[in-house]
Image: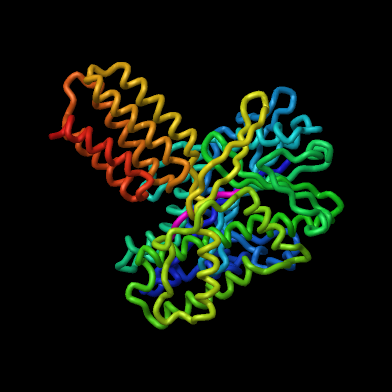
Amino acid sequence: MLVTIQFPIADARPFGEVPNLRLALPDWPEPNCSINPHYVHHFGKAAERIGEPDEAWPDEIKFVQAAKGLRFDRLETRHTGQLGKRFQPRCAFRRLFCDGRAVVRTEIGIAHKRSAPPLKNLTLEEVLCIVNGIVEIPTLVPTVDGESKLRPILLQGKHLARLYANASMNHDIANYAAGIKLVEAGQPVILVELSPEEMSEDAIATIPDGFTVVKETSINGAKALFCRLNSPVGIVSTWIIQKGSATAQQLRSLRLCLIRLHAEREVLDLILKQIHRGRLLNPHSEYAVDMLDQYFNERLKIVNRDKWGGMNQSEIVAAFDATQTIVRPAIEQQLIKRYEGGRLQIWKKIEAYQEQRRATRLVHTVNVNKGATMNVKQVNVSGNGNSVNVADYMCNVTNTVNNNMSDSVADDEIKALIKQLNIEIERVAPQVDPSQVKKMGKNLEALSKELVNEEPDRRWYEVSLEGIIDAAKAVGAIADPVVSIAKKLVQLLVI
C-alpha cells in the first residue's frame, strides 16, 4: 500500500512585471543531477528517477529531493487503521517538481513498512480509515527564521509553498515581498495504490454513494475509484487505484496522470486568481501578456484533451467532477475579464474554463468514523474547491449559541432575538456563499459569548452585529430577515 500526498504550488513569478524574481537555477524541468547537482535551499539536491520517463509526462524524470523540506516526527510509531489490519508507515519518497514555469508540486509517499505483517483483504472503509490516520501524521516544515511547529501533514501545503517561495527567491530583487505573494498553495490530493491482495475486487463490487468509478476500458484495464474524503483535518480529493489487467507501466502512467492533472487545474485556478487580485498585469506589459498567453494556451490544452498516454483523460476529469452538482452559476464578480493585449482565441478558452471551475457546487463527501463505518454527507463547495461543511459548521454555531444563552442573564427579548437570528442564518446557509455563512456564524458566536459576561463590552455588540449585517447584505435579498433581526438587536444592545 502506497499513499501519495501531493501539494500543488502555483508560482506566478515568471509572469510578474519584475524580471528574475525566481532564481535561475535549478534549470527546471531538467536540473543537473550529475557532478555538482543543482539544489533548492531548505529542500535538497536534484536527482533522477531510476525508471524510464513516462511517454505522457517526460518532464517527470528529474526532481529535487525534499527530505529537508518536510520532516516526520517519530513516523515509525504512527500506526493507523483497524486492529489486526494496522498500517505501519514508512517514508517512501519526498520530492519537489517544477515544470519550469508555474506548476510546482511537492509529493510525499508513505508506504506500509516492509517488515510489518502484510495488509490483506481490506474493505473500502478500512482503507479510508488508514488514510484518515495518515493525514494526521505530525510533521515539521522549517521556516526561514528557524521556528517551526508540528502540524498534521495534510495542513502543510501553505507552509511548503512559503518555504519554496523563500528558498527560490532572488534576494537581490527590491520587490521581495510582492514576489513572495506570487507563490501560493493549491488544494492537496491523495492517491492510494493497492495491490490485489490488499483489497479484493469484491470489496468494491457495489460502489457506495459519494464514490465515482472510472471505466476500466478508459484506463488500460486498471481500476480507479474517486471520492472526496471528509478527513479529520479537512476535505481532500482522494483516488484509490489498483493494477487490474493493466501493466506496471500503464499503472504508473495512470498514477502520474491523476496527480498531474490535479496540479495543472489547481495552478490554473490560482494564476487566474492572481490576475483577479491585481498582482499580475498591473500594469500590463507586452512581455507579461505573451508569457501568460503562452502558458494558458499550453495548459488549457493539457486539461481539456481527451486522451493522453493511452488513457481517456476526459473520463478522469468526469470522475473528478461527478461527485459535484452545480446548483447555481458562478458569480460574475468572481470571474476575471479579458486582460488587455491577450489573444481572443485563448481568452475564449479561459472564459469557458472559469465558468466550469468557479461555480458553487453541492459535493458529496465520504466520512469514515471509528470502527470503519462510512456515511456520505452533502457539502457546499465555493469556487476553486474551497470546501466548508455548512451543515456541520452551523450545527457547531447553534450549540455554542444555545449554551451561551442558557448561561446569559440578558433579557428574554434579547435571547429570543438571538435564537431567531440563529434560525434565519441556518435557513439561508445551504443556499448562499459558504464564506459569508462563516462570517455570520463567527460574529453570532462572538455576540452570544459577550452576552454571557457579567460586564459585557458594548463595543463587541456593535462589531459583531455589523459583521452579521454586512455578510447578510452581501448574499442578497434571501438574507433580508437576518438583517432585520440584527438591526433590532442593534437598537436593544448598542443604541
x and y, in percent, of residue 196 in the image: 83, 42
Q: Is residue 107 left or right of residue 314?
A: left
Vertical arrangement, residue 99 with respect to residue 202, above or below: below
Percent position of residue 104, x then y: 54, 60
Is residue 198 visible in this depiction of the protein? no
Name the residue: 60% across, 54% down. 95
Q: Position of residue 163 (x, y in %)?
A: 44, 53
Badge count: 0
Q: Is residue 274 left or right of residue 223?
A: left
Q: Is residue 14 above or below residue 207?
A: below
Residue 386 lies in the magenta stretch: no
In this rendering, is residue 358 above or below 124? below
Let me know if residue 290 appears in the view: yes
- Please tell me which residue is depicted at 32% across the width and 39% down the height of the picture: 482
Residue 124 shown left or right of residue 42 in the figure: right
Q: Quadrant of the C terminus?
A: top left
Residue 184: within the magenta?
yes
Quarter of the image with the N terminus is: top right
* Quadrant in which residue 166 is drawn: bottom left
Work out whether residue 209 or residue 413 is closer to the camera in this orientation and state it: 413
| Residue at screen point 48% across, 50% down | 382
- Name the image quarter holding residue 75: top right
* Region in magenta: 183-189
Going 60% across and 40% down the picture, which residue do you hit? 365
| 202, 289: nearer the viewer | 202
